[in-house]
Amino acid sequence: MNDGVLATHGHDDPSPVNAVGAHFEVLIIGAGLSGIGAACHLVRKRPKTTFAILEARDAIGGTWDLFRYPGIRSDSDMSTFGYAFRPWDDSKAIADGPSILRYLAETAKAYGVDRHIRFGLKVLWASWRTADARWALDVDGPDGQKLRLSCNFLFLCTGYYEYDEGYMPGWPGIERFGGRVVHPQKWPEDLKHDGKRVVVIGSGATAVTIVPAMAPRAAHIVMLQRSPTYVVARPAEEAIAERLKQWLPARAAHAAVRWKNILLQMYLYRISRRKPAAVRAQIIKLAQAEIGPEFNAAEYFEPRYNPWDQRMCIVPDGDLFAAMRAGKASIVNGEIETFTETGLRLTSGQEIAADIIVTATGLNVRLMGGVAIEVDGAPVDIATTTAYKGVMFSDIPNLASIFGYTNASWTLKSDLIAEYVCRLLSHMDRRGYAICTPRRGDTAIADGPTLPLTSGYIERAKHLLPKQGTGKPWRMNQNYALDVMALRFAAIEDGALEFRRRGPIRDAA
């Protein structure tokens, strides 16, 4: 897809993005887990492709650089959360944030993609022109600099939430509270909690991470939850991996552990959907064994919804349960009526004293990094499109986006999507195609949102999400094996993709 228009260079001399009209074959938006992985796949599969990674912030890592709250860690096992092409080589099954950030930086350096990252560049607008078979991007640079870039293919790896601020419900009386209120997404470096009374509002992955991390030094920490979440303990280290390494080469041992965890997750998800009552009972039984006889696990860890209606929370080595057994942490179920000068008052009348209140209340969903999309002069509302294989969107040419699994490691899906994009680009090169557009036709009537979860952040964003159709390739799989077949092995030309060759090219600037 290299048309030779404007300056293009090899990997040892990437195009300067501050040049007027700088053009690339592929532009990747975002230098987090997905963007770094996508770039590595390009280097591995298409070494002559010219590309750049545009990152709005000033550092690599995305989520893993932004979030600095205590105890931040992966919420999936690292054998599947790490890249398939660069196995996670550590005994930790659940890794802390700094370790993951190091892994990302080392991966970017190992594949040379760090040289292609351009920091401080925020993409505001992307406009596709069919006549040119390319995207034109308006970009805000450092010191108010305005740039115009172009590319043949746009790859959005921006995650799914608003980086600037997290979700705040807006409780009454918050301005009266005399202590500190912090949101995990903007954790202050100077926050000291030694000997302090801490309340963490929330019951999701962030809350169950922060509570055991802060508990040892806090006077006491309360996790205040409106309703319970399923919490499951798992070993912090992958013991079987060390045993396998004694008998198998390192890469084979890693592959065995990875597939063990993939298949186990798929089995647990499937049985959860088929026999929710039995799985619910087993989860509560395991939680009761972890928490001890002084507590009633069902009171704190039995939600109103079925397993996997929302994402489950994993606690390495049962650290949350241990903090409760030690008397350093407790859980309270209730709704907030108001903040007070000294803490919180619940609708039940109960008052909870606090010196620090942590609002682990979730994220604001923001798709495509907030980039405004336009196709041939017409603005595009992503919510009106239908997702094609969970990768592209109906009637939007030469654009792919990464959105990982909700019931497994994000990276499992992001790796497959990046592989598929490389396959697609190579197919287009071989056939002389310049444009690829998913077309719904009459067989893909949209019937619902793409994500099956009932989590608060998903419910709040339903009006923003693309739709999915009634059958493949317009259904979103939450199943790695099905996606392997659809993205790695299925024919590229499946009747749903419309391909066109290049027409006359105009000046992209």
Image: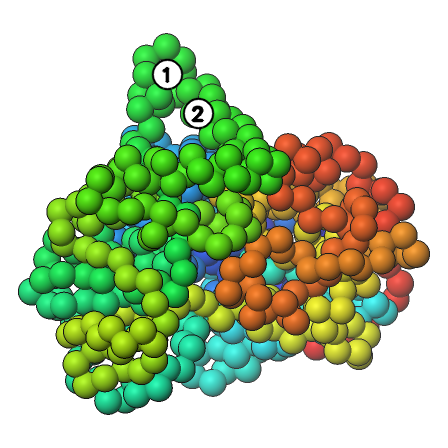
Hey, which quadrant is residue 454 in on the image?
Answer: bottom right
Residue at the right extreme, as displayed:
442
Q: Quadrant of residue 284?
A: top left
Q: Is 238 above or below relative to 474? A: above
**Residue 367, above or below 410:** below
Q: Residue furthest top?
A: 247
Q: Residue at x 9, y 62 (%)?
A: 219
Q: Residue at x 30, y 53 (%)?
A: 209
Q: Amino acid at mark 1?
A: Leu
Q: Residue 119 at x, y = what percent?
A: 44, 67
For the residue carrying disc 2, how many other residues have a C-alpha within 10 Å: few (<14), some (14-19), or many (20+)? Answer: many
Q: Is residue 259 left or right of residue 419?
A: left
Lower position in the chain sequence, tag 2 or tag 1: 1
Is 24 or 248 nearer to us in this picture? 248
Reply above or below: 482 against 421: above
Residue at image mark 1: 244
The answer to whether residue 110 is seen in the rendering is no
Helix, strand or loop at mark 1? helix
Viewer-proximal residue, 363 or 245?
363
Residue 162's spot in the image, x, y percent?
A: 48, 71
Q: Which sits in the foreground, 197 or 100?
A: 197
**Label 2: which residue?**
257
In-image side of 485 versus 283 (left or right)? right
Is the residue under label 1 in contact with that under label 2 (CB below 8 Å)? yes
In the displayed orientation, state which residue is furthest to the left. Answer: 195
**Gap between marks 2 and 1, in whole Å?**
8 Å
Whether residue 179 can be seen here: yes
Could you say which is closer to the camera, residue 495 or residue 55?
A: 495
The disc at residue 453 is: none
Question: Element at badge 2?
Answer: helix
